[in-house]
Amino acid sequence: MPAILLLLLSLPCGLAAQDRDFPSWLDQLRLEALDQGLSTQTLDQALTGLRPLPRILTLEESQPEHTINLATYLRRVVPASRVKAARQRLAKHRPLLEEIGARYGVQPQYLVALWAVESDFGRNMGKTPVVGALATLAHGAKRPHRRELFRTELLAALRILDQRTVAPEQLVGSWAGAMGQCQFMPTNYLTLAVDYDQNQRRDIWREYPDVFASIAHFLSQNGWAGDQTWGREVRLPPGFDLGLIGLEVDKPLPAWQELGVRRADGGDLPARDLSASLVRPDQGRAFLVYGNFRVLREWNRSSYFALAIGELADRLTQ
């Protein structure tokens, strides 16, 4: 029987991760990593002396959709200065962006928008040790499904180190463990990061071809439609059935037209037979969103985030 199973069987029933002291929890994680084939050398280097980072748990409980409205979020994330900078980057890297966009079926403005919002074009990739951040969250996050998610990401980060293709000092990122100019979580790095320039490194920290191609690969693999936009702001008619708002309701555009939904300027909806859903994140502005919006939510589960990417991408083509 694998060592990790023996250890799990020896634990009292119902003993949650946050109820055990951190060193004991870390010992269990080490055994699990060993059972997955990671080397003792890697685990010794990464886990010896590791301690929780208390500020990480505070940050987890203060996400924007819980603290500010959409208008405030968009002003912070898509200010005029960022739009201007994004236009400059789009022009500067256009040949490479168009080449990668054509290969993966993703419009260049979305690659730049994600790059801009995630790391401010590589200027803010985060300085938190990824292993420390993920260990803190895997052990201490309040919700069990979040602890499990971060445990998976922690094991993936340890595997990245075990592959010896990324230096340990390079494995720093956001408070939640996201890395590089595109802020990939470790599992996404392992499965979706691209060595586009074929130099034997998937370098999402320093190499633009790898950064752009990794973003495009993520979107493509999650179902991006290169001939569609993300959605649009709309106007709802008086007395509209609010029960139709939500991503769980999906109707073709002609059906929304019949229900009285119109563009924000009052014009008719597009005539295309696309499936769409209505979202209204803070009970204010309403948006009719398509499949690409759902793909953006695969990147980040926040509707605020997806709307910010959509708005920035739109402004890059105006």
Image (cartoon, helix red, strand yellow):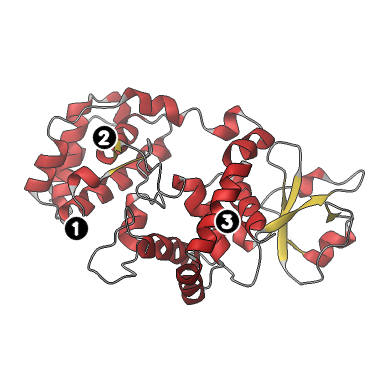
Per the model, the C-alpha gap separating discs 2 and 3 is 36 Å
Which residue lies at the image location 62% right of the left edge and 51% below the top edge? 312
In screen coordinates, is 137 left or right of 22? Answer: right
Q: Which mark is residue 87?
A: 3
Q: Is residue 135 above or below residue 195?
A: above
Q: Residues within 10 Å of mark 3 (few under 14, many from 20)?
A: some
- Picture residue at 78% right of the left edge, 45% below the top: 243
Q: Which residue is mark 2?
A: 132
Q: Amino acid at mark 3?
A: Arg
Compare marks 2 and 3 and give the one earlier in the sequence: 3
Quadrant containing the C terminus is: bottom right
Q: CA distance from mark 3 to mark 1?
A: 33 Å
Q: Are marks 3 and 1 in contact (CB under 8 Å)?
A: no
Residue 28, image x and y in percent? 18, 37
Give how far across and how far down residue 36 sits, in percent: 18, 54
The crowd level at tag 1 (other Cα within 10 Å; few <14, some 14-19, many 20+) is few
Q: Closer to the observer: label 2 or label 3? A: 3
Identify the residue at the far left of this view: 41
Quarter of the figure with residue 189 = bottom left
**281 or 184: nearer the viewer:** 184
Going 63% across and 57% down the picture, which residue do you hit?
316
SS assignment at label 3: helix
Please tell me which of labels 3 and 1 falls first in the chain: 3
Q: Amino acid at mark 2?
A: Gly
Measured from the top left, where is residue 111 in percent x and y?
Answer: 51, 60
Please tell me the numbered disc located at residue 165.
1
Q: Residues within 10 Å of mark 2 (few under 14, many from 20)?
A: many
Q: Residue at x 74, y 50 (%)?
A: 287
Query: Do residues under tags 2 and 1 come within 8 Å of each other at their CB atoms?
Result: no
- Judge left or right: residue 84 versus residue 287: left
